[in-house]
Image (cartoon, grey):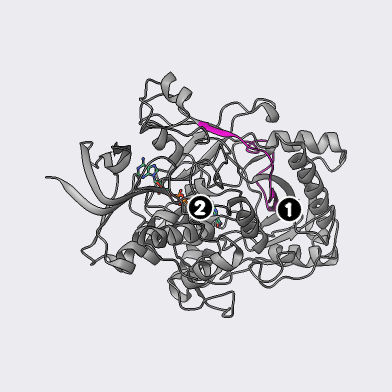
Amino acid sequence: MTERYDYIVVGGGSSGCVAAARLVKGAGARVLLLEAGHSHRHPLLDMPPGIFKMINGSKYMRYHQTAPQEHLDGRVHDIPQANVLGGGSSVNAQVYMRGRPSDYDEWHDILRGDNDYPGWRWADVLPHFRGMEGNHRLCDDRHGADGPLLVSDPGHINDYSRWFVQAVQALGEPFNHDFNGPAQRGVGFYQFMNRSGKRSSAAYAFIAPLADNPNLTVRLNASVRRIEIEGGAATGVTYRDAEGAERRAFADSEVIVAAGALVTPQLLMLSGIGPADQLRTHGIPVIADLPGIGENLVDHPEVPIIAIANGPHGYYRQGVGWRMLRNGLQFKLFGTGPITSAGVEAGAFVNPADPNAEPSIQAFCVPIVYLDRDTLGLVEDAYGMTITTVVVKPKSRGFVRLRSPDPGDMPLVSPNLLKDPADARAMIEGQRFFLRAFETSPLRERIGRVAIPDPGDLSDEALMRHCRRFVKTNYHPSGTCRMGAPGDPLAVLDSKLRVRGVENLRVCDLSAMPNINAGNTNAPAMMMGSRCAEFALGYDVK
Ligand SMILES: Cc1cc2nc3c(=O)[nH]c(=O)nc-3n(C[C@H](O)[C@H](O)[C@H](O)COP(=O)(O)OP(=O)(O)OC[C@H]3O[C@@H](n4cnc5c(N)ncnc54)[C@H](O)[C@@H]3O)c2cc1C
């Protein structure tokens, strides 16, 4: 039987779910949403701290392993990406951030020039953020209260989070009650994409309400292997279904690719769209020579500072044994307690080099000794806390390339974190700034010692060694099929997210970003899905 739809959306992640839902709701279009991963309905995905149980080994994640990284002493690190309906929004830490207005004004400067330019300034994207948002506390010209994406304050705040916020204020940073408000700078508590301890993912917020809508067909465990192109236009896709059978589906209007910034460029290349020399190396016939595909990979690098507590502070062992039972009971009976917290509650945006300039560093306060592949066995598993510092506007760029012409192989990924010396410098400044928080009351009195980096040697060289050894992804790979202005040789998409040189084909995930936003990336991905649907339908919310 031939499957025919108006639109096919490839990848049911943060951006893909929003695009599919808007196409169905906005125009009654017949949409096929193909998601390679699993159903999002799992108790550990629903409850905010479940991510800690999932992140280091779960079928809901796909683990991309980087090529050996020259600037990290040859180290290899993982980039976990979602493998589930809702994509990143089903597995992420739920921190609700949009970035700052200058991020989008910067896009505007990069993109304007197209005849058909739709506008990517802050004023152009704000209605999409606002329209999607159902904020439980804020409602003003920046925040919406009635949208489907539920946003709320942390359900539970650990003492370590409060002490962090107070210590950073004592260092001179203002308290910020809304990091998505007029100013990003300061310290405070994040808002989260959840309500009453339940995740508000793109799957729950946008797809679940359409469960009975006959115009939306969602297929899970359906992995797209190729976009079909005839006469210079996308006509459909070939995918492998849940039973392993190869199937074709046709799109009368458009194919929209939203498989995430690491898979989308791979999929385009496997379909004959990409750098011609690379395609030829793998024996793939060239349909459109777009040398920018896979280039410009940008991610937020993060580095931890870990301190051991001098008492029973933080969330140590709250997820095991009798504490887990107690917390579970509290959550079930009263809907309160640690289970309503994503495990990150407080954070900060600072610029240690110039406090009055836009922030260069974002920090996350994690009230546990956060152990991963790099720190396990090196730092003791004990009461303590971790401050993760992130460079928000990294200059380093990496790439995604094909390993082989087999769609079953993962692409070759090289993010080149800290390649640009400016990123390393910012990271060192950020480390120094937040190490001072541990020497400042009221945090100072609750810390036994700093475990990493070595507080006895805070020279540039020592901190640089620490960064090279422990830097990893903040889970925000972006930019690998970026939009660009006419005449930009590495632009893959025009400013309406259309793939250059191929008709009826758009990309709406984070690959499309001309530069990464300052802050977490889920809400921006949703905004791009929303705009993409409206471009496809021929109108845009303003
Ligand atoms: C562990 C983790 C924590 C994070 N924490 C936060 C946070 O707290 N706040 C925040 O704002 N952001 C956070 N992020 C980042 C944010 O979630 C992502 O940037 C965002 O979800 C990206 O959206 P996307 O649409 O570009 O891609 P994704 O949401 O990754 O969607 C891509 C989808 O495509 C599917 N797919 C892949 N290949 C195929 C194929 N061949 N065929 C069909 N489907 C395919 C994938 O399974 C996936 O569902 C986090 C991410 C991770 C991984």
Q: Which residue is mark 2?
A: 495
Query: Would you say residue 399 sits in the magenta stretch?
Result: yes
The foreground one among 28 and 455 is 28
Rendered location of residue 395, percent (x, y):
69, 42
Callout 2 secondary element: loop
Query: How many circles with numbers are drawn on the protein?
Result: 2
Identify the residue at horizontal 84%, vertical 43% (top origin): 455
The foreground one among 1 and 178 is 1
Question: Magenta: predominant secondary structure element?
Answer: loop
Looking at the image, the residue that sits furthest to the left is 1
Instruction: Indicate which label's residue lies in the foreground, 2 or 1.
Output: 2
Rendered location of residue 249, percent (x, y):
22, 45
Query: Would you say residue 280 sits in the magenta stretch?
Result: no
Drawn side of residue 384 relative to residue 450, left or right: left
Choose top left, top right, bottom left or bottom right for residue 405.
top left
Rendered location of residue 305, percent (x, y):
73, 47
Q: Count residues near mark 1 (Cα–Cα under 10 Å), then give few for <14, some for 14-19, many for 20+.
A: many
Q: Which residue is mark 1?
A: 361
Give the residues in magenta.
374-400
Choose top left, top right, bottom left or bottom right for residue 381.
top right
The N terminus - image quarter: top left
Question: Can I make out residue 330 in this image?
Answer: no
Q: Is residue 311 above or below residue 140?
A: above
